[in-house]
């Protein structure tokens, strides 16, 4: 209060002094005000930085104001936020923020007076700034298809990728590694493209093909496999933060979420061009005559978290979902950390907070809609069956209601005679006294209905009916995003949705080329802009993402950040070559995969030479392949596949394979029930495991599966004792060991051959002499151990007694299979 | 076995290339440690396993922490922050100025009335700390604890609130306190993980997200131990595979992995071998941990392991057996700390007393009071309290207003209150026997020494010898901290 008074006093005083010297002189902006603003404000609110969306170095933006709205109200200094701020009375909004930097009271008074005089600017100050942000940052520059260097000495090269890599390798004083062994290569393409190792017959087929081009033919076979869709859908599901439940608290299940995954598997198997793939996921609902599939694709943005906790502010969580949609879109397609501009201008990249909310606006009018889905094979039959059951339950109850109706018809007249006329509804009143035999059908009906409504027996039956109807089977649904009522978007001051700043329209960051579309910008135009050829980011980001899956490291190692804080591309020409190749080949992902796996770079051995490790520890320059631990779902897939338990069906609903007891109990008040899947569903691939956000399937999490709360562009690859325990002892993994062990025990071959064949099965290579010796010894040791304790051997089969065969032998093979499956190499792509 | 022998032999005849047999001794660690190095974790580069001991920024007071998390928000008004004024104003409205800009979870603003508190508060210890009659055992530890009556948070729903308290922001996907501390310092325990979680009662709203490693590498996730049966997931070998088989198996795995490593020279294989060996050690260390045979009857009684558990109809507490479970967890916490485990979290749900507060809070206090007090005394007696921080936490507090959800007039509980609530800390460099912070006479707002969750976390890291501004991890283009973008060390808390 004190400050306010003194400021007012000063204003009065300064005006008064001026008055004494004659008229109140007109304050001149250019000579008197501008220097104060330039000196005190422009370092944060000038051409370089515009904190709070505010620029104070010339007239037009001063009058326009910042993210919180106008700061100058001409003629009304008391209502002008700028005066409030520079007078420094409120520590929250004080400007400049440090008390020692505050503008002198004289100057505050001068600015107040100038505002009161109308805040007049000379004409030249009123030109719109039209600031177009420019950046020299590499990723914002257009993609130029780089020429492939021609050099006859690059004999090693199989395709242009190799030329770009080799050129760099030479500069770094490195030489390529030799090509990996054929079977290692075969296992590599299987694991990378379809996520399961080759079966014995697939190895046979490969080795039988002795003509040139056998590798390429194997690549084609693998790319044609429907398992490809499963493997690559899993990668994309990480970006889509896919889960089968809401997230917060009760973490309610989402029984239809899987339909989006189904769409994904199908789209990838069909090699849907990536631009279309992106557009359908971002705006499939806005396409002309959008098909059910296209709407299902928008399920991409239905994977945001939901909080159904009692007492939540629904608007808060709606806004959070929109924030997530905006951030995820930017991260996945543009490699931008847009979310950093949610509370303030981006600290490093040329993205303002205003631009953040312009991007946010694309998603702000969306609503979540579940629509009926066309049933999949098997589903209609199931529904029909359930409907039949439902009807058969309904029938007897309906019959008993009918019976009751008949009953009351019998003594209708007698009942009517006992009625107290005064308490009856008017309609019924008029009927009393008329014998039922003389009534019209309508009258009779009315009376009967009235009686039924009072009848306890009938009421009980009707309640039963109602309860049953509530549980009537429903046709399956699909989760989609749809355009709701247009909603205005305001900047959220400091990211707080309760503090609304100025209104903004949908728009894209100005540092990037403008959308081609004219007129209103919606999600569809955003999707077009993202996949347009002018956009320098999307193709680079996607090509880099794909590359990462084959080498374990991106050309830009920070896959999620192509901004100024991200790492620079290790080989920019290669990245741009891949990016243009992607769009030039009709955005075909499979073509890009084929190109990559055909390259000599990809086909190198992953053996690590000490000299190379010293020169290039992170394998940036690719003078070798990398050994990569397989992803969480892949670990399961390999175990199921090698043991022969894997379910061959593609697609379908999520499953709940066995998990240790006590996991679901960790959820909110045990709200989540884990009803273990039966039959073949137990052996489905990892991609189909139901993802419960508050109690995810433990063996997935142990192997670094993402938590599905935010888009995850690259997973960690940890190596922990809990993984060891799981691979040895988890119900499912041990079931695999047992299945493999029993099949080995049943082999008619001599033990040595069986050992060798099992080794090839698990690792797609032949064992060395030393490895053979180790394994022989081990098997012998297990046998000795069980022979000295045959009861122990019987215990292995306690739950599934098998009278046939020798328990000691079979138990030994099971223990042996367990060791084999626990070798490092089993869960590594060499 | 359909793979023909002929085919294999042919394949072999193609001539296998000679593999390198030289190991990449030492150098390989470079690649394995990329994660830690890129994030410039302090300490030596020699041992780069996730739990290798790393030096703190300055001399620490605490070596371990036991975090007792009472999920659901215990009523501070009925336990720690006496407000006699409430009884005076029982049934009256709060002044509108207090509730004007407040969002409630369940309370209907119009009809909300102040709810008095029937608890008796008396002074305890040399310091004269006022504690409720629901916590008689804890009251005997008054001189060891520092009671904070001025905690505040932004979140007012459970799950976001729990994330806020455990990870520093109300969002999913951030690392929890225990993850950060292990990431910063490693763990001295050779046979057990550095971050162990024990749970009693029913599940928390936050589930496993309360002990998630977020964007930090997976090994920093809290490992859930159970106090009976199989203490760690997959710890027991399947039926018919005894220690002998297991020992031979681990050796076999090591030998075969070593041969492979000679071929390919990948340091990750050495880590894998080490993981299997630690797993094997855990297989004996974890059962030893939960086996309480070596504890005296006196100790077991002090913790109240075998107390009688009164029955209560319709309790949120989490069903029968929780008294034993919670007491065991407290004792196990001490045993974990003794074995070098860095961070132990004990969860119990739920304390969300929207109704039936008097009876249910009493039940929960009867469960928690004795074992928690025993834990403090036990640690002290063993000389462990000085280096072990014990914290009593929840996501927020409860309102001085009665809860009238749905306009109900039958008011028997309190709603969520984020503006002022109480927690306490003891040991590990905390100055005991003091009360920090003050709330107004209704307990609505803080009037002295407000402490935000970010401040609490800053203080926690400080006690472990770490500067909360320096302990960061680069993720999605930004350096993230446990304290998000705020946090000040609360010097008053420090001894």
Image (spheres, rainbow, N blue to C red):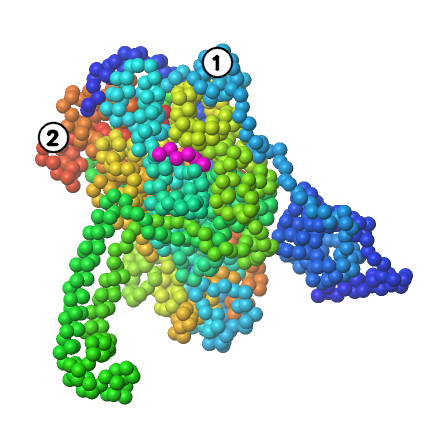
Q: Secondary structure at mark 2?
A: loop
Query: Is any atom of residue B290 visible in this view?
Result: no
Return the x and y of residue A475 as percentages of the image width and height: 28, 52
Query: Is any atom of residue A425 visible in this view?
Result: yes
Q: Nearer the viewer, residue A495 or B320?
A: A495
For image coordinates 51% across by 15% down, the residue present is A150
Q: How many other residues sit within 10 Å of disc 2, few (<14), some (14-19) or many (≥20)?
A: few
Q: Quadrant of the N terminus of chain B?
A: top left
The part of the chain drawn in magenta is A270-275
Return the x and y of residue A821 as percentages of the image width and height: 27, 30
For image coordinates 51% across by 67% down, the residue present is B443
From the viewer's perspective, tell me whether residue A601 is left or right of residue B7.
right
For image coordinates 17% across by 65% down, the residue present is A397
Image quarter of residue A456:
bottom left
Residue carrying label 2: A806
For image coordinates 37% across by 59% down, the residue present is B350
Residue carrying label 1: A154
Return the x and y of residue A438 as percentages of the image width and height: 17, 82
Image quarter of residue A658:
top left
């Amino acid at each position: 209060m004190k400050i306010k008074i003194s400021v007012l006093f000063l204003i009065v005083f300064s005006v008064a002094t001026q008055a004494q010297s004659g008229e109140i002189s007109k304050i001149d902006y250019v000579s008197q005000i501008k220097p104060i603003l330039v000196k005190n404000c422009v370092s944060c609110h000038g051409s370089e930085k515009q904190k709070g969306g505010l620029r104070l170095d010339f007239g037009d933006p001063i009058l326009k104001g910042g993210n919180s709205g106008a700061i100058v109200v001409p003629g009304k200094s008391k209502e002008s936020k700028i005066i409030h701020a520079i007078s420094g009375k409120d520590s929250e909004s004080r400007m400049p923020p440090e008390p020692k930097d505050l503008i002198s009271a004289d100057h505050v008074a001068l600015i107040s007076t100038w505002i009161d005089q109308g805040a007049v600017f000379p004409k030249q100050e009123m030109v719109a700034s039209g600031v177009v942000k420019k950046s020299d940052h590499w990723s914002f520059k257009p993609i130029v298809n780089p020429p492939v260097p021609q050099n006859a000495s690059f004999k090693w090269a199989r395709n242009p990728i190799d030329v770009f890599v080799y050129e760099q390798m030479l500069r770094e004083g490195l030489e390529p590694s030799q090509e990996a062994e054929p079977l290692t290569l075969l296992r590599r393409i299987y694991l990378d493209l379809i996520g399961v190792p080759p079966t014995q017959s697939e190895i046979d087929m490969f080795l039988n093909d002795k003509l040139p081009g056998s590798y390429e033919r194997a690549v084609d076979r693998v790319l044609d496999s429907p398992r490809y869709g499963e493997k690559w859908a899993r990668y994309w599901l990480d970006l889509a933060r896919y889960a089968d439940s809401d997230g917060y608290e009760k973490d309610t299940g989402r029984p239809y979420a899987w339909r989006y995954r189904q769409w994904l598997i199908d789209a990838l198997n069909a090699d849907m061009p990536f631009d279309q793939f992106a557009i359908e996921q971002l705006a499939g609902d806005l396409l002309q005559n959008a098909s059910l599939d296209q709407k299902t694709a928008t399920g991409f943005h239905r994977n945001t978290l939901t909080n159904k906790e009692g007492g939540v502010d629904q608007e808060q969580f709606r806004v959070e979902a929109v924030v997530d949609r905006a951030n995820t879109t930017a991260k996945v397609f543009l490699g931008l950390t847009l979310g950093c501009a949610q509370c303030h201008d981006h600290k490093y990249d040329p993205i303002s907070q205003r631009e953040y909310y312009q991007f946010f606006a694309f998603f702000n009018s969306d609503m979540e809609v579940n629509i009926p889905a066309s049933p999949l094979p098997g589903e209609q039959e199931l529904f029909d069956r359930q409907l039949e059951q439902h009807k058969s339950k309904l029938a007897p109850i309906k019959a008993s209601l009918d019976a009751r109706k008949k009953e009351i018809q019998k003594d209708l007249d007698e009942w009517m005679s006992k009625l107290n006329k005064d308490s009856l509804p008017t309609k019924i009143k008029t009927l009393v006294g008329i014998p039922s035999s003389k009534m019209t059908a309508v009258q009779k009906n009315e009376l009967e209905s009235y009686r039924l409504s009072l009848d306890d027996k009938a009421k009980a039956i009707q309640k039963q009916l109602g309860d049953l109807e509530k549980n009537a089977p429903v046709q399956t649904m699909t989760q989609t995003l749809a355009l709701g009522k247009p909603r205005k978007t305001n900047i959220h001051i400091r990211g707080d949705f309760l503090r609304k700043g100025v209104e903004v329209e949908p728009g894209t960051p100005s540092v990037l080329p403008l959308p081609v579309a004219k007129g209103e910008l919606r999600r569809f135009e955003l999707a077009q802009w993202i996949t347009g050829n002018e956009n320098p980011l999307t193709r680079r980001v996607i090509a880099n993402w794909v590359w990462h899956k084959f080498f374990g490291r991106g050309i830009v190692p920070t896959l999620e950040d192509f901004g100024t804080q991200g790492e620079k591309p290790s080989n920019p020409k290669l990245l741009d070559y891949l990016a243009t190749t992607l769009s030039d080949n009709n955005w075909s992902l499979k073509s890009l995969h084929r190109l990559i796996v055909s390259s000599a770079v990809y086909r190198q051995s992953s053996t690590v030479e000490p000299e190379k490790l010293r020169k290039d520890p992170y394998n940036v320059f690719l003078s070798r392949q990398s050994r990569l631990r397989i992803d969480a779902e892949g670990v399961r897939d390999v175990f199921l596949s090698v043991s022969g338990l894997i379910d061959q069906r593609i697609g379908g609903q999520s499953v709940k394979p066995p998990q240790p007891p006590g996991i679901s109990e960790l959820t909110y008040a045990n709200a989540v029930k884990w009803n273990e899947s039966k039959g073949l569903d137990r052996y489905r691939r990892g991609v189909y495991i139901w993802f419960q956000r508050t109690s995810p399937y433990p063996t997935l999490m142990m192997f670094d599966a993402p938590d599905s709360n935010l888009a995850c562009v690259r997973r960690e690859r940890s190596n922990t004792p809990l993984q060891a325990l799981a691979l040895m002892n988890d119900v499912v993994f041990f079931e695999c060991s047992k299945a493999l062990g029993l099949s080995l025990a049943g082999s008619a071959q001599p033990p040595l051959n069986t050992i060798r064949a099992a080794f090839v099965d698990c690792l797609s290579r032949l064992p060395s002499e030393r490895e053979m010796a180790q394994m022989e010894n081990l098997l012998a040791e297990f046998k000795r151990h069980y022979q000295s304790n045959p009861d122990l051997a019987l215990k292995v089969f306690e739950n599934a007694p098998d009278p046939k065969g020798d328990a000691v032998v079979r138990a030994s093979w099971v223990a042996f299979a367990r060791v084999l499956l626990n070798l490092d190499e089993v869960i590594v792509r060499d | 076995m359909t793979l023909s022998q002929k085919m294999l032999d042919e394949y072999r005849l193609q001539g296998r290339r000679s593999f390198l047999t030289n190991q990449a001794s030492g150098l390989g660690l470079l690649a394995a440690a990329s994660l830690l190095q890129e994030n410039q974790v302090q300490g030596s580069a020699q041992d780069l396993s996730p739990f290798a001991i790393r030096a703190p920024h300055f001399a620490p007071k605490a070596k371990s922490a036991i975090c007792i998390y009472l999920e659901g928000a215990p009523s501070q008004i009925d336990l720690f922050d006496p407000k006699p004024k409430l009884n005076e104003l029982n049934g009256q409205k709060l002044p509108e100025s207090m509730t004007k800009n407040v969002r409630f979870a369940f309370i209907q603003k119009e009809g909300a009335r102040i709810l008095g508190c029937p608890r008796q508060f008396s002074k305890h210890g040399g310091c004269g700390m006022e504690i409720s009659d629901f916590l008689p055992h804890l009251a005997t530890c008054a001189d060891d604890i520092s009671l904070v009556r001025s905690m505040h948070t932004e979140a007012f729903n459970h799950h976001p609130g729990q994330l806020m308290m455990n990870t520093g922001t109300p969002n999913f996907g951030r690392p929890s306190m225990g993850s950060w501390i292990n990431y910063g310092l490693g763990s001295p325990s050779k046979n057990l993980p550095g971050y162990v979680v024990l749970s009693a009662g029913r599940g928390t709203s936050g589930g496993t997200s309360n002990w998630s490693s977020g964007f930090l590498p997976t090994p920093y996730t809290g490992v859930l131990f159970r106090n009976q049966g199989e203490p760690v997931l997959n710890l027991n070998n399947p039926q018919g595979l005894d220690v002998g088989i297991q020992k031979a198996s681990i050796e076999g795995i090591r030998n075969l992995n070593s041969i492979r490593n000679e071929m390919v020279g990948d340091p990750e294989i050495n880590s894998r071998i080490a993981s299997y060996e630690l797993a094997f050690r855990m297989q004996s260390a974890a059962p030893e941990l939960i086996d309480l045979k070596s504890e005296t009857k006196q100790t077991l009684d002090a913790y109240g392991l075998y107390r009688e558990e009164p029955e209560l109809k319709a309790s949120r507490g989490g069903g029968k057996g929780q008294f034993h479970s919670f007491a065991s967890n407290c004792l196990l916490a001490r045993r974990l700390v003794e074995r070098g485990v860095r961070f132990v979290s004990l969860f119990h749900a739920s304390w969300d007393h929207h109704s039936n507060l008097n009876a249910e809070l009493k039940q929960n206090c009867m469960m928690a009071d004795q074992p928690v007090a025993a834990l403090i005394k036990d640690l002290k007696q063993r000389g462990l309290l000085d280096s072990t921080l014990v914290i009593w936490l929840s996501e927020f507090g409860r309102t001085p207003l009665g809860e009238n959800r749905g306009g109900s007039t039958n008011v028997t509980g309190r709603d969520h209150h984020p503006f002022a609530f109480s927690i306490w800390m003891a040991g590990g460099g905390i100055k005991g026997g003091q009360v920090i912070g003050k709330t107004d006479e209704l307990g609505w707002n803080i009037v002295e020494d407000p402490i935000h969750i970010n401040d609490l976390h800053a203080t926690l890291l400080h006690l472990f010898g770490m500067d909360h501004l320096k302990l960061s991890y680069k993720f999605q283009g930004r350096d993230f901290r446990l304290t998000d973008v705020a946090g000040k060390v609360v010097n008053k808390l420090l001894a």
